[in-house]
């Protein structure tokens, strides 16, 4: 495990938190396209008709535009599924949202072209808003993990001086670490830094 593991765990947890807060299903998963480009994620989920309706209604504050309302009404009780997945077999992403492919198999069985377009546009807009926010926040998370070697604390006693400095030794977190939510909240909401420290006693 290394710094990339910690960065990846923090970014993916942050992305999932944002997805859940915006009404995406609990089963929605994410991964990063390339560790060299932190924050460029792919979203994975299968949206059946009820889940799709819930997501779109949440995204529009409870009042759907006419085309979307018509589409959701027609999809009720059908076997329609909209699928989001990583698009690693396509060309490399140009923009953050390009890492997620949206497909709506056999949508024409239930909807008109305009309704299909409205549903796809709404879902792609939802994907875009998440992906851009994650890419932006990933810069702050990465900066919070970048050590500077600065002195954090100095204490003097009669005989010794205690010096605490940031260390460039890896500080490890993974997706199952119970401290992950605490560290993420501190970085994203309170501007905290996360690093190992070294303590020196100088006589």
Image (cartoon, grey):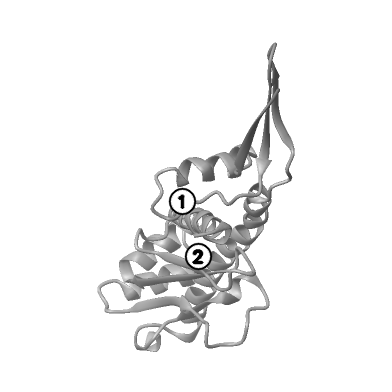
Q: Is residue 52 above or below residue 22?
A: below
For the C terminus, give its image quadrant.
top right
Q: Which residue is mark 2?
A: 65
| C-beta proximity under 8 Å, tags 1 and 2 | no
Viewed as shown, does residue 148 lie left or right of 43?
Answer: right
Viewer-nearest residue: 1 or 87: 1
Residue 80 falls in image quadrant: bottom left
Rendered residue at 38%/65% (across/down): 53
Q: Is residue 27 above or below residue 67?
A: above
Residue 83 rendering spot, x and y as whole percentages: 40, 77
Rendered residue at 37%/88% (across/down): 106
Q: Secondary structure at mark 1?
A: helix
Residue 11 rendering spot, x and y as whole percentages: 54, 57
Rendered residue at 67%/56% (across/down): 139
Rendered image: mark on residue 185: none
Q: Which residue is mark 1?
A: 21
Q: Nearer the viewer, mark 1 or mark 2?
A: 1
Viewer-nearest residue: 9 or 83: 9
Viewer-nearest residue: 26 or 34: 34
Viewed as shown, does residue 186 lie left or right of 28?
Answer: right
């Amino acid at each position: 495990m290394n710094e990339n593991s910690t960065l990846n765990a923090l970014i993916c947890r942050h992305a999932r938190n944002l997805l859940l807060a915006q009404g995406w299903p609990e089963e929605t998963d994410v991964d990063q396209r390339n560790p060299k480009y932190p924050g460029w994620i792919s979203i994975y989920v299968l949206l059946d008709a009820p889940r799709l309706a819930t997501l779109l209604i949440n995204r529009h504050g409870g009042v759907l535009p006419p085309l979307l309302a018509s589409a959701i009404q027609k999809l009720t009780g059908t076997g329609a599924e909209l699928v989001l997945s990583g698009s690693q077999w396509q060309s490399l992403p140009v923009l953050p949202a390009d890492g997620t492919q949206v497909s709506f198999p056999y949508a024409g069985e239930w909807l008109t072209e305009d309704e299909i377009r409205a549903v796809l546009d709404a879902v792609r807009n939802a994907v875009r808003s998440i992906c851009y926010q994650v890419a932006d926040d990933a810069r702050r998370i990465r900066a919070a993990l970048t050590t500077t070697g600065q002195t954090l604390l100095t204490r003097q006693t009669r005989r010794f001086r205690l010096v605490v400095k940031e260390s460039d030794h890896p500080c490890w977190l993974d997706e199952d670490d119970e401290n992950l939510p605490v560290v993420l909240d501190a970085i994203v909401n309170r501007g905290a830094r996360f690093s190992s420290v070294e303590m020196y006693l100088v006589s």
